[in-house]
Image: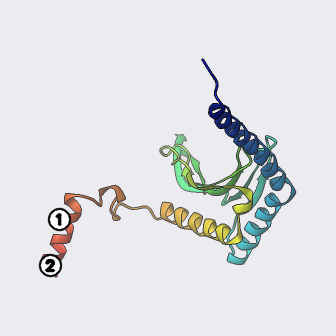
Amino acid sequence: MTFNEQDCLNFRRKVERYQEVLQNTEQYREIWQKRLRNEIVDYLQRAADAAKLGCAVEERSDIQNLEAVSLSLGSSHSGLGEPVGDGLHRDLIKQNGSLVYQQLFNGKILVLVNYPYIEKYGQPQPPKTLAIYRPEEIKEPYLIRHLETFITEITLWEDYDDDRPDENQRIGFKLNFEQEEKQAIG
């Protein structure tokens, strides 16, 4: 079996790409530590203050290089209670949701929305991933868009009802039938 010149060149390029990715990880982590984490905290706090949004902007650093910044709406009484006997009820706690900027293992930043949920009332909805960025890609216009998306998603969760058509059902026969009905009525 031979290892020709072209094979060697292709393999060398792949090794160089691998080494570049490893260097990027180190650079991304350094950017997060030196400035990006603090910039995100400052921006989220200023935006929340300007909008009079009751929240807490927190840094989580349980594991080095997997830190996160979270804008949390905290927790509250859900208004629901479960009986615990003798006419007593225990309040069920509601987690009100959060917007998270989580540093990934490779130094990139994952942005996600954690939806509200009420303990013992179904399963929490999985987080919604908004994007994954290299640190230099995160700019103020993205941060405000993330905040707007977050508030929109939380508002939709809070205002849930079954009057809105399910997005997955807006194709096929039902959609066409609804359109034909509207035309016949109009």
Which of 49/75 is in front? 49
As helix, strand or loop, the secondary structure at mark 2 comes to helix
**Residue 86 visible in the displayed image:** no
Toward the right, the furthest residue is 34
Which of 95/20 is in front? 20
Please name the residue shown 21% across and 60% down the image.
174
Please name the residue shown 64% across and 24% down the image.
3
| Above or below, 126 relative to 145 | above
Which of 178/161 is in front? 178
**Residue 33 visible in the displayed image:** yes
Q: Few, some or many C-alpha atoms within 10 Å of disc 2 (few <14, some 14-19, many ≥20)?
A: few
The three-letter code of the residue at mark 2 reads: Ile
Identify residue for label 1. Answer: 177
Q: Position of residue 7 (x, y in %)?
A: 63, 31
| Residue 116, quarter of picture | bottom right
Which of 34/79 is in front? 34
